[in-house]
Image: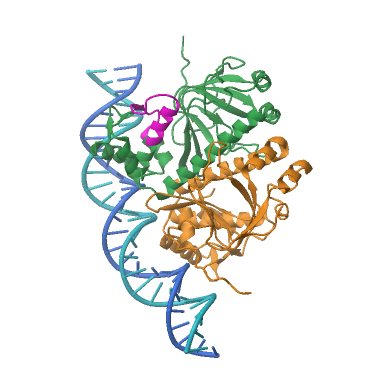
Chain colours: A orange, B green, C cyan, D blue
Amino acid sequence: MTVIAFEPPPRPVAPRLAGPVRGAITDPCVNCTVRPLSICAGLDHDAWERLKRVNQTMVLEPRRLLFQEGDPADHVYTITSGQISLSMSLPDGRRQITEFLGPGDFIGLGLDSEMTHHTLTAEALTEVHVCRFPRAPFTRAMEQSAQLGRKVLSFASRRIAAAGEQQLMLGRKTAVERVASFLLRAARRNEERGAPASPLTLAMTRNEIADHLGLTLETVSRGFSRLRQLGVIRLDGADRVTLNDLGRLRELAGGD
Amino acid sequence: MTVIAFEPPPRPVAPRLAGPVRGAITDPCVNCTVRPLSICAGLDHDAWERLKRVNQTMVLEPRRLLFQEGDPADHVYTITSGQISLSMSLPDGRRQITEFLGPGDFIGLGLDSEMTHHTLTAEALTEVHVCRFPRAPFTRAMEQSAQLGRKVLSFASRRIAAAGEQQLMLGRKTAVERVASFLLRAARRNEERGAPASPLTLAMTRNEIADHLGLTLETVSRGFSRLRQLGVIRLDGADRVTLNDLGRLRELAGGD
DNA sequence: CGGATTTTTGAAAAGTGTCAAGGCGAGTGG
DNA sequence: CCACTCGCCTTGACACTTTTCAAAAATCCG
């Protein structure tokens, strides 16, 4: 297989890409429902039939943007594999990653019916497969299926609760507490998916973690080192983290 | 009218109150619909009839809690007058105010159907009138009225977008930028309600603003002083703010 | 007017950011 | 197979912003 040689976009300020999509592969996407946590999983027959007619699989390579702040928002997405960061930036380039998303997560909350454009940027951290739905039929399906409506609202509610915790972290926790909180959340995420909590594999760089925690990459690195010195974690390479003592990690995270 | 002499709860860690409610006055509440931005405004007849049977007015005096983290969450609310803070706290007392709410705002987003207890504390900043709905009938009304469902989801979406901006602020803005952002949002809020942007009247103390911006009250105060020195605002008392130069204030807020 | 609360201001301390150098690991090409 | 390069991570030293502690000024309210 020959690999076409085009550069991944430069990191700090990702330029607008001609087309962020590598390719629409299958049509419709058949993988949206396989994740038990997905918004499509266990959907009633009618709603699913409607959606199946309009959805598409998309594949993104690492660093590609699914969309960018200011892009027209005419699709919603479900991640079937890989990880994505959602971020907002200030005009001078300072960036805040509001959340890291993985398989089963839904992209499209935070879009009021009157919002025609994205306020966030979605960037692939790994190779990512998403299932894409045009917004209009998705909205219709949501209104016709009480179950889908409930599910979206439930996702939105949990997002709001999570955003609150993130605000508490950003506003009130110290650097080490933030790093510990970050690791704990990653561990909980693993558990939600039936994976063991402990050997974490991080898909994101120190810089991306920093942009999520409101720190610099150096401070994040020092945080990891601190936790390692304390014996709470073990690092095998920068992206492989073993949690030795969840209780102590919870204390170090600020106890919440 | 005699006022019963009971102390408002001490500030830093509000103790569990026997009953946070001063009184349920009218039943049903007739004021929920008067705010054009309220979730009840313009609701279709059936949905409104259902809700009208179960809602109640509640009045809270300043500093009273509507509910606290851990309380059973069996109502949702609409504010008809006054202002409320929603906050989360760490076990050691550090507090983050996730948002300030006013007339027309809805309280109850962030509650997944499976969440039986509040993760937030709601405290009255001023005398507050809220319209309260038991959760179960409200949820039913939501499922039977597509319009109400849409409205709640729209509120949730806007909340999510706002939370993102707040995260960007907490993670990446300097102290002065945060204070400027805070004033700008207060100004926009005024405008949304048809009031002039400029002479702001702040219902919250420096400490509460600090807990919202992830700063200390001293730093917030210095922020105000700085903006005053720069001629961007004028202060008539701590709670009366005139915005002299919205453009410049926007720049100082980080330009977003 | 007077006491209490809140706000403002100042000075010192702490925490995090910035700048710079070196290390580690993965992928490349000789 | 090994040396090299490149990107990312770690660590150190210092600078800067914000916090902390303290006191004075302003405001509120009886």
Say which of B244 and A115 sits in front.
A115
- The residue at 63%/41% (across/down) is A136
Looking at the rendering, which quadrant does residue A193 occupy? bottom right
Task: Tally the marks.
Answer: 0
Q: Residue furthest front?
A: A18
**Does residue B158 lie above or below B83 as drawn?**
below
Say which of A91 and B84 sits in front.
A91
Q: Residue furthest top?
A: B1
Q: Which residues are magenta?
A: B184-207
Query: In this image, A126 relative to B113: left or right?
Result: left
Quarter holding the N terminus of chain A is bottom right
**Does residue B53 lie above or below A201 as drawn?**
above
Q: Position of residue A217 (x, y in %)?
A: 43, 61
Membership of B243 in magenta stretch: no
Say which of A148 and B206 sits in front.
A148
Q: Is residue B113 visible?
A: no
Membership of B203 in magenta stretch: yes
Looking at the rendering, which quadrant does residue B133 occupy? top right
**Does residue A91 lie above or below A142 as drawn?**
below
Q: Position of residue B71 (x, y in %)?
A: 60, 34
Q: Position of residue B155 (x, y in %)?
A: 56, 34
Query: In this image, C29 relative to A55: left or right?
Result: left
Q: Position of residue D27 (x, y in %)?
A: 29, 25
Q: Is residue B102 visible?
A: yes
